[in-house]
Image (cartoon, grey):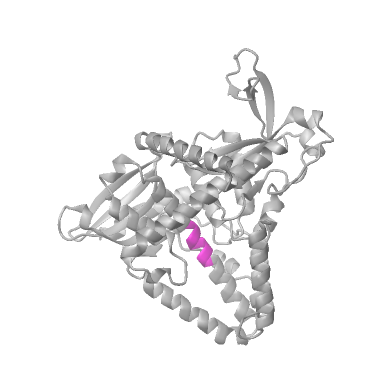
Amino acid sequence: MSNRFLLFLAMMICAYAFSQDILAQDSRFYVQRQRINEKANLLTIFGKLDSPNEDIPLVSVLFETQGDDNPSNDRPRYLWSLTYAPPTVKQRVAAAIPFFYHRSTSKQVWKNKQAPPPIFDFKASRWRTIARGLWRLAQLSLIDDQGFLFRAVPRSYGRNARDHRQGHLQRTLTILYSLESNGEVESAIPTAQLQELRARLAISGGWFNGLIKREALSKVAQKNRSHWEQARGRNWELLRQRAEAEGLYFEPLIFTDGAPTHAILWVARQDLRNQANRKFDNRFLNIANPYDDKRLLEWNGYVDVRWLDENNRQVEPDTSGANRIELIPLALYGLDHPRIPILLIDFRDESNAKVREISRRVTDDLAHTVFRISPARNFSFWAVKKTFDLMTKRLGNDFNQPSRLKSYAELDLLLMLDDSIAPPLRAELMKGLRGMTINPMENSLRMDTRLAHANYEALLKSLRK
């Protein structure tokens, strides 16, 4: 590891610590704890918007009490992501169609009259792991022998249902990490309980994670978060260096906890005219050369006007010697991906990032549903596929990579809560995010906000009956 990279990590840690101090004073979240009955309390995390009376209920956790008023000995029982709702019949049918990678229709709020199901049961995590293993065994030994539809339909539906749930779990986990240094939250959620919530969600989804004992949860969750932070720092540096080398402008998007989870690359309109013959290396960027793209010269989409001084630092328009530049957005990247800065939105080509995201789904669906590749049936083909997966993962090519699910869940939350993003840019990001959705069970961001309020009201009514 180079000295330059170590220095960069040190600077990032300092900036992160400083941002955490700011967060403690002005957090985007606040917590309410309500007594349901003598044996249960409901804790709800709200997201604050700039406009009054528009706070969004995001996460609710039901705690089992010991019959006293001491929250430190309460135990979490159920967790609800209030933007999550059971899919409609149309969404379920679309999710079961093999090789269908598109969002179908959003669920309507007026159809959501019942209380939402808990997205996580803290006492059933072990049984969920065992049930998932038994289903997997039955699928390999019995269902896969019954024909293409019997193989493809359950796999397609199961994959979409897991991704739908996991996306909301990732959004919830991001919220819980954002609460870590909020002093106001400490009075509502004791540190030990907050750590247990984060740990259980951080390790959910693995084959054996549900069997981990409570005493080891905190250590495992801290290890997972350490990996995220290392990936974030590495991807930040890779993307920034690559952007500077290609004459582009790098701008991080700071999340509510002060952490840079995403970054946008811009190109100056005057550079397109002055450097028309410039060579372009798209390593790690995975976008087309902007300097020979005639569409950018006639760009009529969103443009960010800024004033820079002689050192290319942004200043006020009336600053002496300031130069006016027009920046055109090229692409948005997620910085939490384990290998490379992952392309999320290409403002010129909507299909670019989508094809890259679908690539792993296509290879997996072809292997399991068409060619029926498994270690028991055809070990050689299975070994070739595993080798191919390992090579593409280690080489850092944005093909056949792990899903962008976490980065998209964080971006959803960022767009939902951060009103500081310019409205035209926000609209462009939401448009790009909608175009990238490949899960038929997903709802639109606007509908998620409406569902959150409806789910919260229905949940309170059901618990107080």
Q: Is residue 306 visible?
A: yes
Percent position (x, y) of residue 321? Answer: 65, 14
Q: How many marks?
A: 0
Name the residue rendered at 37%, 69% in the picture.
212
- Specify the quadrant that holds the C terminus: bottom left
Position of 35 with respect to 132 (left or right) is: left
> Which residue is nearer to you in this view: 390 or 270?
390
Report whether 197 appears left or right of 434: left
Q: Give the residue displayed 55% in from the left and 82% down from the top.
A: 139
| 162 part of magenta stretch | yes
x and y percent of residue 456 in the render? Answer: 36, 52
| Range covered by the magenta-colored residues | 161-168
Q: Position of residue 299 (x, y in %)?
A: 75, 34
Q: Is residue 431 magenta?
A: no
* Dominant SS in magenta: helix
Drawn side of residue 293 relative to residue 394, left or right: right
Using the rendered view, name the quadrant where residue 66 is placed: bottom left
> Vertically, is 348 above or below 134?
above
Residue 430 falls left or right of residue 348: left
Residue at the extreme right = 277
Residue 101 location (% of width, % of height): 64, 62
Question: Which residue is outermost to the left?
Answer: 68
Residue 146's quadrant in the figure? bottom right
Task: Kindly identify the residue that appears in the image at 35 percent across and 34 percent down.
Answer: 25
Residue 109 visible, this angle: no
